[in-house]
Image (cartoon, rainbow, N blue to C red):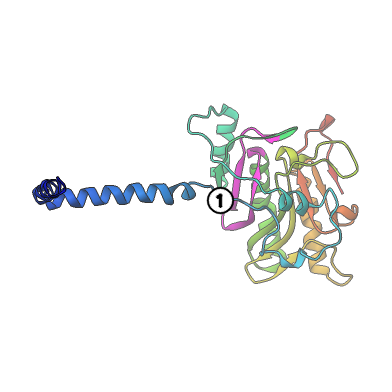
Amino acid sequence: MAGKFRAVFFTTFRRLKPAGLLSTGLALAAVSACNTGSVLSLQPAVDVGAQTSAMPQYTGMQKLVPSNPYMTQAAYPRMDEPMSPVEQVPASEIDCRQQLKRLDVAYTDLAPIHEGQCGIDYPVKVTAIGSVEMKPAATLTCDMAATFAAWTKNELVPSARWRYFSGVKTIHQGSSYSCRNIAGEGVLSEHGKGNALDVMSIELNNGDDIDVRKPGLFAFRTRGFLNNVRADGCQYFTTVLGPGYNYDHRNHFHFDIKNRRNGYRACR
């Protein structure tokens, strides 16, 4: 009986065409690959937030406080998801994105962010404003991105050329969207709405890296440049806070577009 079975098996095997054997082998290999590797390749990359190797000079700062822009982003990494192609975008958001294109902003639309009381309905992730890089990329509302881009192109870049005879290469930001309250208060920070951005340093094309922290007594050019940053920012943002305002803002400029009564602006 066993000999008869072997004879039938080998007869059938000889009748198989080489092409059939090849396609069968490929199919088995594909099934094997799908079962072992393809699931891992679908996992999205994680954006770890603001504390990157691009800014090593800030890694040894004093004890973190609730308003410190590094704390929430470094401790709570969040996965970015692209906007769904069927997402219904309001006309105001479409107009805003057209403005971003006119300002030559490199950005990506993200899926809505909802984290308790925090979130952005139609967030954008900005990587550059013209030739000026944003490091790390900033997650913002479109309105905040457009306001910051207009200030960068119309004020920051011309001021750098006038003071340093150089263009701006990179804006190093410490915090964009971040779910947290204002330090010492139970009020949601504008960072939690995507309406705020903290600037830590400004790197120029000539190699100068202008630290936002309060300059020395005889750093006349740096002081004049940072004074321009603060004063010109008040024409675009409703809040500009920086070194000299309080301890929490000793190492960065905070810009936001908080909507206040009677058009009040806080520039300090």
Residue topped by disc 1: 45
Look at 67% across and 49% down and name the residue there.
77
Chief secondary structure of the magenta portion: strand
Q: Is residue 82 shown above or below 246?
A: above
Q: Which residues are magenta?
A: 119-143
Q: Residue at x 78, y 56 (%)?
A: 228
What percent of the width, then of the height, locates residue 103? Answer: 57, 46
Position of 155 compared to 24: left or right? right
Q: In this rendering, is residue 31 above or below 165?
A: above
Q: Position of residue 74 (x, y in %)?
A: 72, 53
Please tell me whether residue 137 belongs to the stretch shown in magenta: yes
Local crowd at mark 1 within 10 Å, few (<14), some, or many (≥20)? few
Is-magenta flag for residue 252? no
Residue 142: image location, x then y, percent: 63, 39
Front-most of residues 186 and 116: 116
- Taking the image as shown, residue 228 lies to the left or right of residue 139, namely right
